[in-house]
Amino acid sequence: MFLASVLATGVVTGTWSDAAEGGAGRTDPDRMSSGAHTRESALADRAAVERAASDAVEDGKSGAQAAAEVVSRSGDRWSTIYTPGEYEDFQEQLGGGYVGVGLWVRPADGGRIAVSRVQPGSPAARAGIAVGDRLRAVDGRSTRHAPVTEVVARLRGAASGGAHGSAVAGSPVTLDLQRGDRRWTETLHRTRLRTRNVVVDRPAGGHGPARVKVAAFTKGTGAAVRRAVREASTDDGLLLDLRGNTGGLVTEAVATASAFLDGGLVATYDVRGEQRALYAKRGGNTDLPLVVLVDGGTMSAAEMLAGALQDRGRAVLVGSPTFGKGAVQMPSELPDGSVAELTVGHYRTPSGRTVDESGLTPDLVVGGGAEKRARTVLSGLGGGS
């Protein structure tokens, strides 16, 4: 199950899989991070998408392309169509490994594409590309008004509509970029990268609260957070840093919630009118003082987790208002093997709040110096300073 720009994985477009019993946002390297989706937005009709794909295949055409055209006309900005190769590549990314240049991208105003995250040590980072830079073109092809999945396919080296995944490590890709009034071109060489989505920073000398930075909810995230919680001292408390987290696998977001809760509700969501719920497992550490850092880059599954901890009175949220993305998508395989992830509903926090557009408001709204203020709050909760 995923939560993406809808509740989905990586692209941020949201997807939930029935097998996972829920869903949350996803976020993948070289994939879009998500955007808001309102309850009043037009949704792509699943039957129409599948019918268009089936008719196209019978005519010897691309089912994925036909499905994408139906989604585009629907006005549902977060539903996504993947070719078989793109979806295979996407699943690999959820496992934490991929071939690429170390960029995450998202939609921006005016049909543009912006960089939302740069992986440290990656080709993109070594070239000096930064969060907020505009990606104007990939290999000479404009990204303006292009579907994010198509832009991602170009970054990864997958042929649009092709059956195969990304290009091999070492293959070049040329990016046209803009930062303010400056425009420039970089030619990068793809490499095999592994995402390190959970980083634990411990204070020098071992005294004071650890900061657990969760960049995305890929496979193994929940287990990594649980290990950090087991090693944390109740006297010191813990900072859970979800700033810039664009989502991921909902199962991993729920597993992370389970590290801090002794069972109970994490979120409710609807799938075409049918109400469902996600619950934490029992046995989490409910005594550890906890502060959660959030900002405008916190979205999808990360908002679901932060909202659950806030509503359950388990953590104090510090930072700036979150992005506001809570739509649910579910995947469906099309006749040619491509996959349609279509918006089917929305999720709510345990108290019944929806985050669409409004996002979450922290208990303590802070501009600069959020981490310092968070440590002060944690000290007041009984954790170390």
Image (cartoon, rainbow, N blue to C red):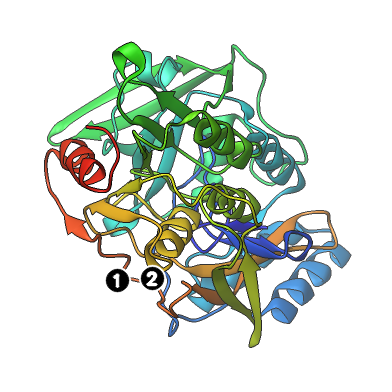
Q: Quadrant of residue 309?
A: bottom left
Residue 106 in the image, given as x and y percentages of width and height:
40, 48
In this rendering, position of residue 377 left or right of residue 272: left
Query: Secondary structure beneath disc 2?
Result: loop
Residue 112 located left or right of residue 27: left
Q: Which amino acid does the dot numbered 1 rest on?
A: Ser
Q: How many marks?
A: 2
Front residue of 123 and 172 = 123
Residue 380: give x, y in percent of width and height. 20, 46
Q: Quadrant of the N terminus?
A: bottom right
In the rendered image, the vertical position of residue 206 relative to residue 106, given as above or below: above
Looking at the rendering, which quadrant does residue 68 occupy?
bottom right
Q: Report the residue at 70% width, 41% height from top.
A: 91
Q: Badges 2 and 1: C-beta atoms under 8 Å apart?
A: yes
What amino acid is at disc 2? Val
Instruction: Confirm whether residue 139 shows in the render.
Output: no
Helix, strand or loop for disc 1: loop
Q: Is residue 164 visible?
A: yes
Q: Residues within 10 Å of mark 2 (few under 14, many from 20)?
A: many
Q: Residue 351: x percent and y percent?
A: 43, 78
Q: How far across and how far down the image is residue 328, in percent?
A: 57, 69
- Tell me if residue 18 comes above or below residue 29 in the rendering: below
Q: How many residues crowd mark 1 within 10 Å: few (<14), some (14–19), many (20+)?
A: some
Residue at position x 58%, y 70% in the image? 71
Q: Determine which residue is flagged by label 2.
A: 355
